[in-house]
Amino acid sequence: MARRKVQLVNGEIYHIVIKAIDGINFFRDEKDCLRMIHDLFEFNDINSALPNFRVIAHYHKINLTRKDLVKITEECQKKRKKRKMLVEILAFCLMPNHIHLLVRQLQEGGISKFMKKLGGYALYYNKKYGRKGHLSQDKFQAILIKNNEQLKTAFVYIHTNPVAIIYPGWKEKGIKNAKRAIKYVENYRWSSYPDYLGKKNFPSLTNREFLLRVMGGKEGCSNFVNACLKFKQNLADFDYVAIE
């Protein structure tokens, strides 16, 4: 995944989308999603990932016992250098054929380096499904978030994305059952939204303190998302942060 022609500056926040090519689904089962969660955490480091962590991610394929897994984990932790993140992941959402990230760049070239590392997911995917070639489009897409209003909109936009799974085209056609849509996004495992509501999902993957202040805490997060799904609030502002 090469860098898009947009200035990526340390300290700034960006909405990033990674899209699959040719209608391919990034994630065919739960293990694929878990692999990407692993990669988002593990590769967000200026240091190279230790090979043993890849073994841990695939221990179910090589029949390691739980005792072996614990031992390998302890050895890896001893060898690992102090973590130095490339980006601060504020929010994420995994969709079947694309990925949404809301990140703040921490290191010079951090976003581009992170995207390059995430491209390694294709090696796992191709080996598992017996295919060859690229998995994602050549260039990831990014939009600079300029102020808190856009930040709130990006938060809602990213976390309401899964509604399209149960109500395709909902932004244009509307939602038949808002309560169902709200419950669906609150329990959608492959996003950071459950963690923002205080449900422990993948709490170590995101830094939520900053956005919780901006959104007005857990209640504010819920209010903004629910208002969008019930009354279509924020939809007019989606154009500022959307990447289609």
Image (spheres, grey):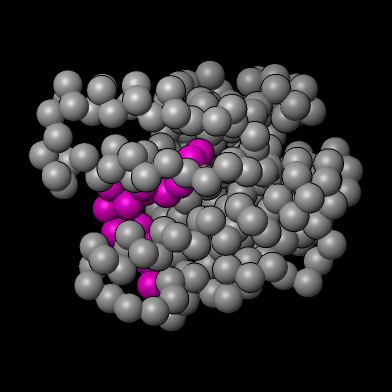
19 displayed left or right of 16: left
Residue at (64% x, 56% y) in the render: 113
55 displayed left or right of 95: left
77 displayed left or right of 85: left
Q: Quadrant of the N terminus?
A: bottom right
Reply above or below: 217 against 18: above
Q: Is residue 37 visible?
A: no
Q: x, y (%) of residue 87?
A: 68, 42
Q: x, y (%) of residue 187?
A: 42, 33
Q: Main secondary structure of the magenta part?
A: helix
Magenta region, residue range:
24-42
Does residue 36 show up magenta in the picture?
Answer: yes
The number of numbered badges drawn on the structure is 0
Reply above or below: 217 against 211: above
Q: x, y (%) of residue 213?
A: 77, 22
Does residue 39 show up magenta in the picture?
Answer: yes
Residue at (58% x, 42% y) in the render: 47
User: What is the quadrant of residue 22 in the picture?
Assistant: bottom left
Residue at (64% x, 20% y) in the render: 218
Q: x, y (%) of residue 76?
A: 38, 29
User: What is the quadrant of residue 149 in the picture?
Assistant: top right
47 displayed left or right of 96: right
Q: Is residue 25 visible?
A: yes
Q: Quadrant of the C terminus?
A: bottom right
Reply above or below: 122 against 58: below
Reply above or below: 49 against 170: above
